[in-house]
Amino acid sequence: MAYKLLEGIRILDLTLVYAGPMGTRLLADMGAEIIKIEAPQRPDMFTRMMSYPENNPTQEKVWDQGGYFHILNAGKKGVSLDLANEKGREIFKKLVAVSDAVMENFSPRVMEGWGLGYEELKKIKPDIIMVSMSGLGHYGPMRDTIMYMTGMENMSGLTYITGLPERPPLFSNYAYGDWMLGATGAFALLLALYNKKKTGKGQYIDVAGREAISCHIGEVIMDYTLNGRVKERNGNKDASMAPHGCYKCKGVDEWVNIAIQNEDEWNRFCEIMGNPSWTKKFSTVEERLKNQDELDRLIDEWTSQYDHHEVMERLQKASIPAGSVLSLKEVYLNPQFIARGIFEMIDHGENIGKRPVIKQMPARFSGMKSFTPKRAPRFAEDNEHVFCSLLGMSKEEVKTLEEQKVLGRTPKFPPGRPLRKDLIESQAGKGAGYFDPDYLAELRKVFGEDVGK
Amino acid sequence: MGEALSGVKVLDFTDEIAGSYCTKLLADFGAEVIKIEALNGSDLRSKRPFLKDEIHPEKSGAFFYLNTNKKSITLNLKNPKGVEICKKLVKNSDVLVEDFAPGAMDKLGCSYEALKGLNDRLIMTSITWFGQDGPYKDYRATNLIAEGLSGAMFTARQTRWPKDMPSVLGGHQAEYRSGLVASTAIIASLLSRAMTDKGTWIDLSILECVASTLAGIAADYSYMGFSRTTVPWGIHGFPTQENHPCKDGWINNLPGIGAVPDIADLIEKPELKEDPLFSKPGARLAEPEKFEALFIPYFKEHKKWEVMKKAQKMRLAFSPTLSPGELLEDEQLKAREAFNKVEHPVLGEVTYFGAPAKLSETPGKKGRSPLLGEHNDVVYKSMGYTEQELTILKEQRII
């Protein structure tokens, strides 16, 4: 369930790709009205072509089929509008006049180049809130640095402290940096909305993704500013807990995390392993910290006899922190996620059907009005509603503008191509993941017979 | 300039990173946050790093960073009189944040239902590893356990070595990001309350916060049955999301769409542009080692900033790997005044990373963390307790 906390708040969403759309999805999950604006000439291309249903795009309206787009844009309205066109900018300004906020993640010069910088928008609506999201921020000597997610993570300090010591510094590899930028943008916008409620004033917000990430290694940076010490990447080891790591289990690529916090937990763990004689050597935390590699090897020998869930359950029964390392498939099928409902079933219509869509605001709010978010909009789906009902334009006007490509219902888009499974399965001679041919059947067991229908 | 959350009163019962980071964000942006600590101090006061590695309740850098701009009072919740005082505080607060195990507040007589009876506008926030219900509700966890069970850690492997042991993101990312989500949920609830005058109980699971960050990538499985172990090169046509060695560290050489041939110019070997390894994605994906052998020698002869700046001039999205210490020297962060510098009575001058976003009208506060019980007098006297009563409460080990 999503909750109507932000009912009546209207946000113009110019964001593209991953970080920005994720941030506005978070706001949509709390009931804000998000109007997503895309130019027919420059649609939100990347996510629209990621993860076609059954990896089999049909060529008709292929741009409406991408799974990434569906998740990142659920609950939003979608209109087409070309801001590179003067008429398009005029219409945009009319929208600004009836909205609370504008969120964008273009590179720093773009909005000003169009005459749509904060100072201009303020003239149209004095209390407007504008949020700009970028890699290194909209001011400063390096503001024009070209950045994707890798750059934000790499320059935040996080990558430096992540990964195995014998390998290069490691990225999140699931767009954590993008999530950080989007979520921080949403957080900052809410602060500004609250301030506006009190004072009647709007403001400009500049979010730099790498700064948002640096905030999340606050205590690691403190070790440097207090003691001059630079933390080095060290796999899954901890400075005060041992064992603390990820251990190999019986199945293919199955792992379990174990974190022993004190002597009681260590003793209980030894008991579960049957008190093998080697454990005597590691009876104090000092000894365990000193000989971690050997300790980890010995624990690996024990865990690799069992299924990862079995290790977790046995340890948890003895109140020891342990948890399987879940693959994405296992996340969808996990009993805790199912019981708590982190996925919403959303119907995406023809050829796609119902799919479980992961929430972006996972919290529950008791007593608040709840709702199921609408599926992500089809391209230009809400043109009539927004331009006619909201702005009072006539249907003929909209039609003419559509013909002039100021609006437009057909985005510029390449033919739909399936993902090259062969490349993924052969990556580095080992493969970059697993394809489960029975995934629809697996999902149907949990989410009902109509998944994909 | 003002403070976005001025006038908002928050009671902070948290003892771990997620909850304390949540209330830190609220305090940094102007809320009055009162941290309620056990008589011997919050557990966070025993968390590394310590100034000069000296274990001392006022010398923890982690406690400092996670508690800037808060007030601290001591209160013994194991004593019924302590609970009574706690309830008095609740009557006069907007937000309560706690991170006890599910059911613990209930045992104190402070369930949401009970507190709602005292203050129906209260926004109570309960942060737990797994949520208030479900089969894992009483399971134990740490940052590492939450990362693994969320599905996020499974992908944390090098693109070239996708069968490695997964390694958790550095620091405490599961906990920090849950703090960010919690504070976002609280501000949204404050906005809602301004319209409806109704409070709420926010039930937030760290595990779910981490899983939600899979976001778009979650479609890999529900649309194609795919579970990634790392980033698939096949999507980008280039071995992305890797760092390569250079003279003084590491550099990521992600070029941007269609720009791989430009790397040949960067390394001053324009003749390589025609080489299939540069011109044809299929060729370099089949032989990544052969491909990287063409540019790594150049990287190894140059420094990371040098390569990065040259690449950026050519509009290539290269980035250096910066250590936490190097952030202090970063010219962009300096220009943006990203770090705050404050005086602390025990730590002396402290430099810490400032706000996660730049807000033009409400930029936030640049304060320090409180000493243990520093605000006992101010807070308890404002509740009407006299000097004499406070002395008695102290003697009875209630405050």
Image (tube, rainbow, N blue to C red):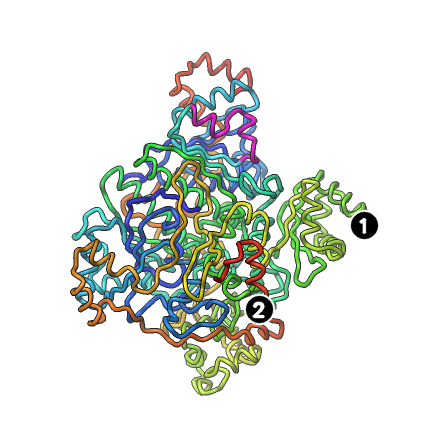
- Mark 1 lies on a secondary structure that is helix
Please say if B284 is above or below A367.
below
Residue position marked by numbered label 2 in the rendering? A432
Is B103 a magenta residue?
yes
Residue position marked by numbered label 1 in the rendering? A278
Between B367 and A361, the one nearer to me in the picture: A361
Is A80 a magenta residue?
no
**Is residue A115 left or right of A158 when viewed as pictured?**
left
The chain carrying label 2 is A
Q: Nearer the viewer, mark 1 or mark 2?
A: 2
Residue B256 percent across, percent down from the top left = 41, 72
Q: Which residues are magenta?
A: B100-117
N-terminal label among 1 and 2: 1
Residue extending furthest toward the top = B388
Residue A410 percent across, percent down from the top left = 30, 71
The chain carrying label 1 is A
Name the amino acid type tagged 2: Ala
Name the amino acid type tagged 1: Trp
